[in-house]
Amino acid sequence: MKAFLISFLNILFFTILSCFLQISCTGPPPEIPPGPREVQLGHDNYIRNVTYHVPKKLRKRRRSLVLCLHGGNETPESFGRITRRGFNKLSEYNNFIVAYPEALNNFWNDAREDSVSLSHYDNIDDVGFIEKVVDYAIDSFSIDPARIFVAGLSDGGLMAMRLACEIPVRFKGFATVAASLSLDQLVECKADTAISLIAINGTRDPILPYDGGQIIVDDELKGSVLPIEDAIEFWLKESQCENKSVARDIPNTDTYDETRSERISYTNCKYGNKIVLVRVNNGGHTWPGGRQYEVQRNIGKTSKDFDASEEIWKFFKSL
């Protein structure tokens, strides 16, 4: 019995030692190099491009992902310029990776009846492509699947609305700037879960009207959208939120931009989600705090009272 016990202890000792040496030799998982990473993903018979921004100060736990969807006839690079690369800067201190997917021929298939762009005409599977962008990030960057967000500008905002309708469970929160629900999206919108949404809209948007109606780009009609306040009401009902709001003015820090903004928050939701509308009075089809990327007569005024990237991340962080 004693010999058996000694033999057992020897085996146990060498087994533990072997495991220890194996762990010591393999070491910790390699760090992810910071900076941009350009990736090509095959989907639906197309090779699609996406650029991921990896911050220098990336912690190992609870890594988030923010997808940034560019506007129509734009690119991920132009989205970065318009927003002054706000999300890249925020990611350095908030432990998230930024993804900039690229639409085919620069337009998303956001489910509008718009036969002008390739993505709509050929019914490109942009929903499936976005899912692949998310899956790649989870596998490659150890993203927390429960901390994935999407933010879109204009056509990118309409695409974000489509994602909210079709695959809401993949995202913790949505943000749209200069966008709303299109009437075509509304017909097919069958969201089966509550969502959290922040929408930022200018009341003098000459392209996508705040009070709803036709989207007009270069004198071409691009489909109709709901008034943004009706879109908010739709999501309140879908997410089982009470139609009770708290409105607060955003400080008018720049008196020369001729805009004033207010934040309207709905937080009485059954599942603890949140809906927020930031109304930019006299604002245009622009990214607050970003660049005036075209002349005012084409896109309207850009508010300088707050930074939309910071406002959106503050909302995402609160979820």
Image (tube, rainbow, N blue to C red):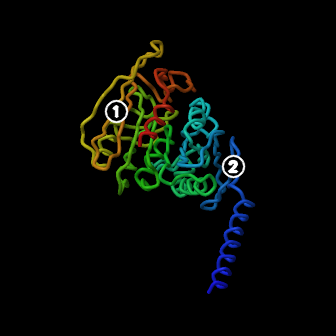
Up the image or down, 37 lies above or below 210; here it is below
Is the Cβ of the residue at disc 1 closer than 8 Å to that at disc 2?
no
Sequence-first disc among 1 and 2: 2
Residue 241 lies in what quarter of the image?
top left
- Mark on residue 159? none
Q: Amino acid at mark 1?
A: Asp
Neighbor class of circle 1 (other Cα within 10 Å; few <14, some 14-19, many 20+) is some
User: Where's residue 65, x and y in %?
Assistant: 54, 47
User: Where's residue 32, x and y in %?
Assistant: 68, 48
Residue in the image at 40% along x and 19% along y: 251
For label 2, the SS is: loop
Up the image or down, 94 lies above or below 271; here it is above
Residue in the image at 54% along x and 53% along y: 130
Residue 277 lies in what quarter of the image?
top left
Question: Does 52 sit left or right of 69 as displayed?
Answer: right
User: Where's residue 6, x and y in %?
Assistant: 67, 79
For label 1, the SS is: loop
Q: Which residue is mark 2?
A: 31
Q: Which residue is mark 1?
A: 211
Q: Amino acid at mark 2?
A: Glu
- The quadrant of the picture occupied by the N terminus is bottom right
In terms of depth relative to the viewer, which is nearer, 271 or 85? 271
Residue 318 lies in what quarter of the image?
top left
Neighbor class of circle 2 (other Cα within 10 Å; few <14, some 14-19, many 20+) is few
Residue in the image at 29% along x and 41% along y: 233
In terms of depth relative to the viewer, which is nearer, 90 or 79? 90
Up the image or down, 16 lies above or below 255; here it is below
Question: Does 118 sit left or right of 274 as displayed?
Answer: right
